[in-house]
Image (cartoon, rainbow, N blue to C red):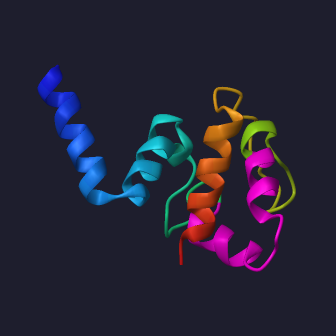
Amino acid sequence: MKRTLLALALTLTVAGPAMANEALAKSKNCMACHSIDKKVVGPAYKDVAKKFAGQKDAVDMLANAIIKGSKGVWGPVPMPANTQVSAAEAKELATWVMSLK
């Protein structure tokens, strides 16, 4: 167990925040409907970053959508609320999504 945690900590330290945030997205089941560069059920994260690029409130708006869900932004399929995601985690995920190019 200690080795596994140490390996994970080293991986995240070496790989940096991008991998840590992708791991957070996987742990919160975001990747069941999203992918970094391909549409799945929801839009690709890179498409989200492109759509909201330059909007000063994009991170806060996305963090709110992560927690409360949204509908109509990307078509008829709604994004359900993710109540298991804390406000801090939602902001971290939204910041990561907006950093993707």
Give left or right: position of 80 versus 71: left
Quadrant of residue 16 within the rendered picture = bottom left
Quadrant of residue 95 within the rendered picture = bottom right
Report x, y in % for residue 78. Answer: 79, 47
Up-down: is 54 above or below 4? below
Residue occupying the point 71% across, 28% down: 83
Residue occupying the point 81% across, 61% down: 75
Let me know if residue 78 appears in the view.
Answer: no
Report x, y in % for residue 23. Answer: 41, 45
Residue occupying the point 26% across, 40% down: 9
Quadrant of residue 49 within the rendered picture = bottom right
As for residue 30 lying within the magenta part, the answer is no
> Which sits in the foreground, 85 or 46?
85
As for residue 54 lying within the magenta part, the answer is yes
**Which residue is the extreme one toward the left?**
3
**Which residue is the extreme one toward the top?**
1
Residue occupying the point 12% across, 28% down: 3
Span highlighted in magenta in the image:
43-65
Give left or right: position of 52 versus 90: right
> Which sits in the foreground, 77 or 34?
34
Up-down: is 40 above or below 38? above
Give left or right: position of 3 versus 82: left
Secondary structure mostly seen in the magenta stretch: helix
Give left or right: position of 43 versus 56: left
Report x, y in % for residue 56. Answer: 82, 71
Number of labels in the image equals: 0
> Which sits in the foreground, 26 or 92?
92
**Which residue is the extreme one toward the right?**
72
Let me know if residue 40 appears in the view.
Answer: yes
